[in-house]
Amino acid sequence: MNNSIEEGKSIAITSYILVIGVLIAMSMNSENKNSFASFHIRQAAGISLTFISLALIVSNFDSFYITFPMWICVSVLWTYGIFSAIQGHTRPMPLVGGLFQKWLKSIG
């Protein structure tokens, strides 16, 4: 398992580089599937989809008091995810991580 984590760490970290990182990581992980990398690809894809969805909704309001909490929430999830990948952990993100794993199980 430790060898699998070390092999998948660079792919896992790459997946957290905005939306394009998810696509690059999926490409890197397509040939030799790594379960650690797949876990983080699903987490990062979930964050990206959440960010895009929230941004589309929040953009209609043009209010700092709505936009700022959205950015804080997404930033906290992103930070949690990338540090989890760097440390070699497969902990789902609080509140939404389990859902990302279930909904995006075909990704990775």
Image (spheres, helix red, strand yellow):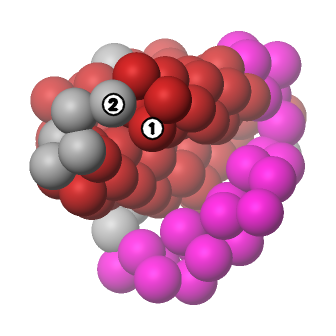
Residue visible at 82% across and 19% down in the picture? 87
Classify mark 1: residues with Cα within 10 Å, few (<14), some (14-19) or many (20+): few
Residue located 49% across and 29% down the image? 65
Q: Secondary structure at mark 1?
A: helix
Answer with left or right where residue 93 lies relative to residue 51: right
Q: Is residue 53 above or below residue 3?
A: below
In front of the other: 58 or 30: 58
Q: State the quadrant of the C terminus.
A: bottom left
- Residue of label 2: 63
Secondary structure beneath dot 2 equals: loop
Type of the residue with mark 1: Ile
On the question of residue 25 being in view, the answer is no
Residue 90 x %, y %: 78, 47
Residue 82 % position (x, y): 62, 22
- What are the residue bounds of the magenta stretch? 83-106
Give the number of callouts: 2
- 92 inside magenta stretch: yes
Residue 50's quadrant in the figure? bottom left
**In terms of image quadrants, where is residue 95?**
bottom right
Distance, label 1 to label 2, CA atoms, is 5 Å
Disc 2 marks a residue whose amino acid type is Ser
* Image x and y of residue 103, in percent: 46, 83
61 vs 57: above or below = above
- Residue 93 visible in rendering: yes
Q: Which residue is mark 1?
A: 66
Task: Please say if the residues under marks 1 and 2 sit with CB atoms less than 8 Å apart.
Answer: yes
Is residue 82 located in the magenta-colored stretch of the structure? no
Compared to 31, does 88 lie above or below? above
- Expressed as whole percent of the image width and height from the top left, the position of residue 5 reads 71, 34
Q: Residue at x 67, y 27 (%)?
A: 76
